[in-house]
Image: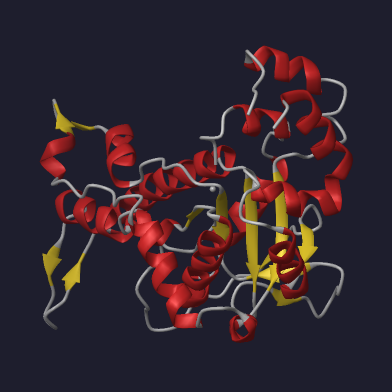
Amino acid sequence: MHFVKSQSDIIKFNTKRTRRIRMFAGFNLEIDEQFFNSQQKSFYEYQKIGKAHIDSQGKGIENALNEYINDNIIDGSKIQKDWFPEVEADIFLSHSSKDAELVNAIAGWLNDTFGLTCFVDSNVWCYAGHIADMLNSNYSNKRSDDNGGYLYNHKKCLKVSEHVNTMLSVALQKMIDKAESVFLINTEQSIHINSDSKSVDLTYSPWIYQELVCSEIIRKKPLALYRYNTELYHSISESYRYSNTNEALTISYNAPTRHLIKINQDILQKWKRQFDGDYPFPLDLLYNEYFGDVVEETRSYIKY
């Protein structure tokens, strides 16, 4: 395999095309458990494979709060680095936390079939609620109530939430930017039909909403950049949720999905049939359907 000598060559090569070509690719995948009935392994086998390969990326480190305090100032950047570390992954899977088993199975199928690595934040990162609990216990006037629970200062809790949400948001955006491709796992749990406008999807998850918007506006990188440096890559998930209160708060957001290419289980099957096990970049075979000229030009230039 032959590679170009520098990334500057890649940038020059793609200057004329980057405005109209999105080679950071996003896909809107409609899928359910039935897909796995026709595969070589069972849904539960793929689930185990997915969880194992994602868990191997390593968990964040949940250090005690005093590890991050210096001169009475908490180092938020260090908390983010330890609890939400950046990892290497080909595909960022955006999904509802209610689809955790399905997402692990999809990650397992992609890894077992193509050797691709996926990022699922809830499997790799520490639970953001733990950070909130840790900070609230120390800074939000935590005290026992008469019912065996705890009371907190409301304004201080809001301030803690601002910081924790920012840490998680920035970490997610970095992973989306780093990954080669984003797959939105489109199910009844993540995306809902807008009764007022069938052309606009809805989501009730603020995290899926943020991830979709981020994938829409994030800088689009040339395919050649990924092929030159094959260590770049990312998934989307709704991992940080507050515990239930007296009544569930439900807020809907318009879910921007038009920039994502719609694919389904038939496309996955076709992609699988095209892969012979030897091609070094399996995602190219999926891209061929939509960016064939760019894939061919990149292959010709980099010679792989």
Q: Is residue 299 visible?
A: yes
Residue at screen point 66% across, 54% down = 212
Is 277 positioned to the left or the right of 197 in the image? left
Residue at screen point 15% across, 27% down = 70
Location of residue 154 (image quadrant): bottom left
Residue at screen point 33% across, 54% down = 56
Location of residue 144 (image quadrant): bottom left
Is residue 107 shown above or below 170? below
Question: Which residue is nearer to you in this view: 239 or 260?
Answer: 260
Q: Is residue 21 visible?
A: no
What is the x, y in percent for residue 86? Answer: 41, 40
Question: Which residue is nearer to you in this view: 89 or 114?
Answer: 114
Is residue 25 shown above or below 144? above
Question: Which residue is nearer to you in this view: 300 or 235?
Answer: 300
Is residue 188 shown above or below 167? below
The tally of labels here is 0
Q: Quadrant of the C terminus?
A: top right
What is the x, y in percent for residue 131? Answer: 26, 53
Is 299 positioned to the left or the right of 175 in the image? right
What is the x, y in percent for residue 161? Answer: 37, 53
Is 194 positioned to the left or the right of 243 in the image? right
Question: Which residue is nearer to you in this view: 15 or 299?
Answer: 299
Q: Quadrant of the N terminus?
A: top right
What is the x, y in percent for residue 278? Answer: 62, 49
- Colour mapping used in the image: secondary structure
